[in-house]
Amino acid sequence: MLLQYTIQIMDKSLIIANLTAGRGRAKKLIAPVRRELERLGISYELYCTRQPHEATAMAQQGVIAGYSRIIALGGDGTINEVINGLVDSDVIVGVIPAGMGNDFIRMTGIPRNPIQAVSLLHSDEIMTVDLGLFNWVGGSHYFVNCVGIGIDAQVAQNVRKMKWLRDIPAYLYASLKAVMTFRAFSAHVSGTDWQDERRYISLNIANGKYCGGGFNLAPSAKINDGLIDLWAIGDYSIPERIIYLPYARNGEHINFSKVHHWQDKQITIDSPAPLIAHIDGEPLSLPAGKYTADIIPQAIKILTCKKKQN
């Protein structure tokens, strides 16, 4: 009976849904997603989270139970939580996008339409991607897309406070507000054979290209190249920030004089003061001190559509 039960579990996908993702969009998607799963004959179990970080614990339980595929139904934060529960496992990750930014899926070939994404649960196309590990005094956390320190973290905070906008308009408004109010910070950054120290408005520690609802802040980043990209933006005046903001949307900021770029397997940042940050869109307050980011190559398997990878 135990063997039969294990086989039944392995044939099912565990779907972990964050009903608050996308300002309630995920909750509205449950019924149509269920209908599509049943139409396609996909066997699944559904678990809805009720509190922060619950998706990580549930993903860990899914590994123990023997699920071969675990699906995140939500946004980038939900994907992050699920993946943090799957490190060092062979479980394949699927995504049904239901967040506001949905930045990670832009590089994977996963459709932005959640109903279309359900069809990938039938797929045998797998993409193996890197993970980043971010460490600070008192904590550590894996990231699959990026860690943003500075103005992009302020954007993430602004978006979470909004009541009347969502999706790309929310990120654009939040970005404009942040460039007009954010104060630059001092930091020392370093890697294997390079270092830099100055005042910055943004440090983007990137595994993936996109953050902030489609801003291409790290055009050179690839989620499977075994490297971390650090895109650092020095201080600009408020008029300059407003003028240059549209260029950052399309990745055209890279040749500006105060934009700096390095690639490495480990990056270190020293800050004399506390900083605000986000990990895959989820806000984080950092104490003063040293932070490191390490790459873990080929760490997670993702269900994908290879024809659409960016």
Image (tube, rainbow, N blue to C red):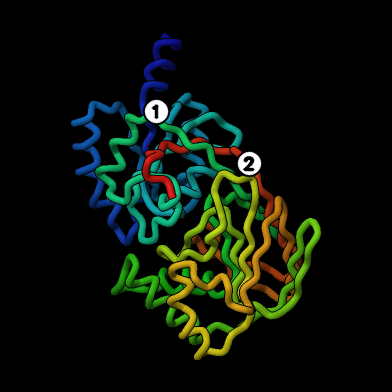
User: What amino acid is found at the position of numbered circle 1 in the picture?
Assistant: Asp
Judged from the image, the secondary structure of the residue bearing numbered disc 2 is strand
Residue at the location (61% across, 34% down)?
88
Q: Nearer the viewer, residue 91 or 124?
A: 124
Which of 129/260 is in front?
A: 260
Please state the horizontal and vertical placement of residue 236, each as a whole percent of the image: 59, 85
Q: Residue at x 35, y 49 (%)?
A: 97
Residue holding disc 2: 297
Disc 1 residue crowd, few under 14, some 14–19, many 20+, Cα 10 Å: few
Quadrant (top left/top right/bottom left/bottom right) for the N terminus: top left
Q: Quadrant of residue 137?
A: bottom right
Instruction: Name which residue lies at 59% across and 38% down.
Output: 299
Residue that lies at the very extreme toward the right in this rendered image = 193
Left or right of residue 151, residue 94 in this image:
left
Give the amino acid at mark 2.
Pro
**For this view, does 148 lie left or right of residue 79?**
right
